Every structure is written in structure tokens, then in C-alpha cells.
Image: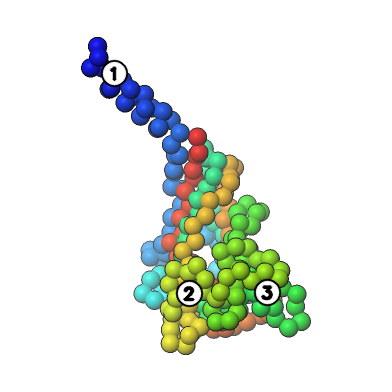
């Protein structure tokens, strides 16, 4: 009987460890390489935009570039049982983003926004210009300039949407990876910006790639 003590104890330990494991259920992925929007809708202030706007940037297919309040949204209609979602994507910040700098005649800077079912886990600023601080990876708060330009980025010095990498302002790549409390049977995810002035794409814009959503159930 003594020989059975270790196997039984090991089984009990294994059961106690696996009981509280997090369940991960992939529910959405798009790297745009197929040219398919996969249920993504694009709209502007006038309504839905018909073209899919998948372009080639730096050798990869991306969705964008966008600016001036373009709204990129997709809905997952049937979510599995979960109590959080994990949202991951590559965010390309192109050209002359000026962080927390407020344009003359306005009271707020240019924002970049991630919306999930009416809440805003990301509501922040980015800067590609040395000396102009940004809010990311925190959300924007008036009077607070916590991070330098291009802070917490994955890659800097990429070509801009309209300018070469050597220009200095170019493009900065961010790998965004966040958890969000969520237990609804549907999930609506949106990406957009809030710019104070109407600007050409070559002035400042953004693109996304490798969008992934995972439903997670923490036991």
C-alpha cells in the first residue's frame, strides 16, 4: 500500500492545479493577407465606406491608412462562455503625430481610440516627434506627459505612409495586447481616431494588422 501514496498524491496535486486553469477560446483573427475584411466595416462621418482599404505597407498587408475619424469595426455575434477578452493587434502610427500637443484654438490633442461595446480601454495619444511626449501606454490625462515620443514601441524608424524612414518621423509600430472584462454573448470592437483638424493622409494616419480576439474564462 505504501507504494500507492506518491501516485495518488500526484494525481490530487494535478487535479488541484488544473481545476483553476484559464480557458482560452480564439474567436477572431485577421492578418489581411487574403485581402478579406472578415466582417470588418469601415465608415466615416458620412456613413459606411465601400472600399476595403487593405493596402501593402512595408511588405505586409495591413488595414489602412486611416485618419480624420475613420471608424473600423467588427462584431463577433456568438461568443463562447467567458468573463474576459484578450485583444491583440499591431498598430502602425504613421508620420507627424504630435502626442499631447494641443492644436491652436482647441482644448484637446489628437487621440487614438479602441472601443469595446461602448467602453474605451484605450483613449490615448502618440508622438513620432522628439520632444513632444505622449500618453501611451496610459490613457490621456490633461496636464500629464508621462512618456517620451515613441515610448513603449516595438519598432521605430519604419517608412511613413508618405515619407521615407530617413525622414525621422516615419512610422512607429506598437504591439498592443490587453485584457478587458467582458461577458456578453456578442462583442463589438472598434478602432478610430479623434483629430482636431481635417488632415491629409500624408500628414498623420494609422493602420492595423494581425488583429486577434480570444475569449477567456478565468475559473
Label 1 or label 3, whichever lies nearer to me, is: 1
Label 1 or label 2, whichever lies nearer to me, is: 1
Q: Is mark 1 in CB contact (under 8 Å) with mark 2?
A: no
Q: How many marks?
A: 3
Q: Residue 203 lies in what quarter of the image?
A: bottom right
Residue at mark 3: 109
How are the colours assigned in the image?
rainbow
**Label drawn at residue 14:** none
> Would you say 30 lies left or right of 102 here?
left
Residue lying at the far top in this picture: please name it: 1
Mark 1 vs 2, N-terminal side: 1
Q: Is mark 1 in CB contact (under 8 Å) with mark 3?
A: no
> Would you say 121 lies left or right of 80 here?
right
In-front residue for pair 45/211? 211
Instruction: Rate crowding at label 3 as few (under 14), some (14 to 19) or many (20 or more) other CA atoms within 10 Å.
Output: many
Q: Residue 59 lies in what quarter of the image?
A: bottom left
**Label drawn at residue 172:** 2
Q: CA distance from mark 1 to mark 2?
A: 58 Å
Residue 191 placed where, x, y %? 57, 63
Instruction: Rate crowding at label 1 as few (under 14), some (14 to 19) or many (20 or more) other CA atoms within 10 Å.
Output: few
Amino acid at each position: 500500500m505504501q507504494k500507492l501514496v506518491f501516485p495518488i498524491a500526484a494525481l490530487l496535486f494535478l487535479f488541484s492545479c488544473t481545476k483553476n486553469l484559464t480557458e482560452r477560446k480564439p474567436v477572431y483573427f485577421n492578418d489581411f493577407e487574403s485581402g478579406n475584411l472578415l466582417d470588418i466595416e469601415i465608415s466615416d462621418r458620412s456613413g459606411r465606406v465601400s472600399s476595403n482599404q487593405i493596402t501593402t505597407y512595408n511588405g505586409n498587408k495591413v488595414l489602412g491608412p486611416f485618419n480624420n475619424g475613420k471608424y473600423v469595426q467588427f462584431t463577433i455575434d456568438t461568443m463562447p462562455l467567458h468573463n474576459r477578452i484578450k485583444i491583440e493587434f499591431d498598430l502602425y502610427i504613421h508620420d507627424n503625430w504630435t502626442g499631447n500637443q494641443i492644436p491652436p484654438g482647441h482644448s484637446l490633442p489628437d487621440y487614438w481610440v479602441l472601443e469595446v461595446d461602448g467602453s474605451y480601454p484605450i483613449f490615448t495619444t502618440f508622438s513620432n516627434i522628439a520632444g513632444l511626449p505622449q500618453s501611451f501606454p496610459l490613457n490621456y490625462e490633461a496636464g500629464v506627459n508621462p512618456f517620451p515620443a515613441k515610448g513603449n514601441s516595438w519598432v521605430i524608424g519604419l517608412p511613413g505612409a508618405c515619407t521615407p524612414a530617413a525622414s525621422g518621423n516615419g512610422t512607429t509600430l506598437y504591439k498592443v495586447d490587453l485584457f478587458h472584462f467582458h461577458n456578453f454573448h456578442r462583442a463589438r470592437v472598434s478602432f478610430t481616431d479623434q483629430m482636431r483638424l481635417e488632415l491629409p493622409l500624408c500628414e498623420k494616419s494609422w493602420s492595423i494588422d494581425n488583429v486577434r480576439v480570444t475569449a477567456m474564462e478565468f475559473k
